[in-house]
Image (cartoon, rainbow, N blue to C red):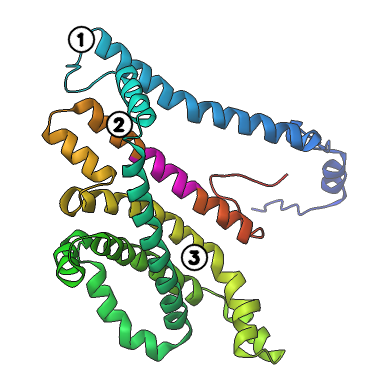
Amino acid sequence: MSTDRRGPGPDHDDARLAAPTRLLVRRPGPQELHPGRTHRRRRALELALALAVPLLLVLVWQLAAARSWIDARIYPAPSTILADGWDRARAGELWPDVAATLRRVLAGYLLGTVSGYLLGLLMGSLRLVRAALEPLLDALYVVPKLALLPVFLNMFGLGEGPQIALVAATVFFFVWISTMAAVLAVPAGHRDAGRVFGASHWQMFRHVLLPASLPAVLVGARIAAGVAVLVIVASEQIAATDGLGHLVFDARALFQNDVMFVGIVCVAVLGVLFSELVRLAGRLLTPWAPRDRGRTRT
């Protein structure tokens, strides 16, 4: 019994060559043909969605209050909140509280950012310093910062000191962690290149560590900006006689819910503006870094 085993021969080669060949052609789309126009349309759509969602929620809230679906005494209509806020602003009753909160936030944020960045840079650059301080700072980081308010009251007494110290302590840990992690994440090849070219310590920081770590540092600073507003409002509810936090807490105690919501709205606006200001500063300081929220350069 014999079997016929045919390997690849001329007939098989001819059949393979005669098979049709498909050519895949990709035509450029609108993004490739008109990148600027596509980017503007995408940004317009994103802006429309960003405005439409909160506006829809406000309209639903207004309708619910008007139709008595909710108790307007507890949840005043947005129109009532807006009218009361406008009246208080025109009478000059709102601005002192806004100024007090803003003053404390800026002072504490500046102190916490500078100290956190310097220590994070030092610990990220020197291994022995990191080994000596990191366990202690990790233990302090997990302590709720509001729990430190009595300590700061004993240290600084009543007044601006405890609020500013509490904000500074909160911001410090966010900036310290992001800075140390960013410095440690700088590729070793960057450092080696600097050493090969004979860079000094200052040149190594200026041309290697700073450009490579600054985008991540600014992300931590932006997160800290929002947290700073939250902390100062909570602090003002406990140990302050003015500020937006005191306004909200005092209005709730007096059952002035419209005034309470005016303070809450002011806190929200202040937090958004402060966070966006830090983000804008980050974009100006690091033009080489990728933009957040999926934004791309055109």
Q: Which of these two is toward me, 129 or 93? A: 93
Is tag 2's residue or tag 3's residue first in the polypeptide sequence?
3
Residue 43's image quarter? top right
Q: Give the SS element for disc 3.
A: helix
Residue 68's label in the rendered image is 1
Image quarter of the C terminus: top right
Residue 266 shown in magenta: no
Q: Give the SS element for disc 1.
A: loop
Whole-angstrom CA distance, mark 1 to mark 3, is 48 Å
Residue 270 shown in magenta: yes
Write down the residue under mark 2. Answer: 262
Q: Amino acid at mark 1?
A: Ser
Q: Which of these two is toward me, 160 or 35? A: 160
Looking at the image, which residue is at 34% across and 56% down? 104
Q: Is residue 36 left or right of residue 73?
A: right
Residue 106's image quarter? bottom left
Can you give x and y, in whole percent of width and height, for residue 77 in the image? 28, 18
Can you give x and y, in whole percent of width and height, for residue 140 in the image? 23, 72
Q: Residues within 10 Å of mark 2 (few under 14, many from 20)?
A: many
Can you give x and y, in whole percent of width and height, for residue 213 in the image? 54, 70
Q: Residue furthest front?
A: 91
The magenta segment: 267-276
Total residue callouts = 3
Can you give x and y, in whole percent of width and height, for residue 172 in the image? 36, 68
Question: Closer to the observer: label 1 or label 3?
Answer: 1
Q: Is residue 140 left or right of residue 183?
A: left
Tell me whether the residue at label 1 lies in contact with that at label 2, contact meaning CB atoms closer than 8 angstroms: no
Looking at the image, which residue is at 28% across and 76% down? 137
Write down the residue under mark 3. Answer: 217
Looking at the image, which residue is at 23% across and 60% down? 159
Q: Amino acid at mark 2?
A: Val
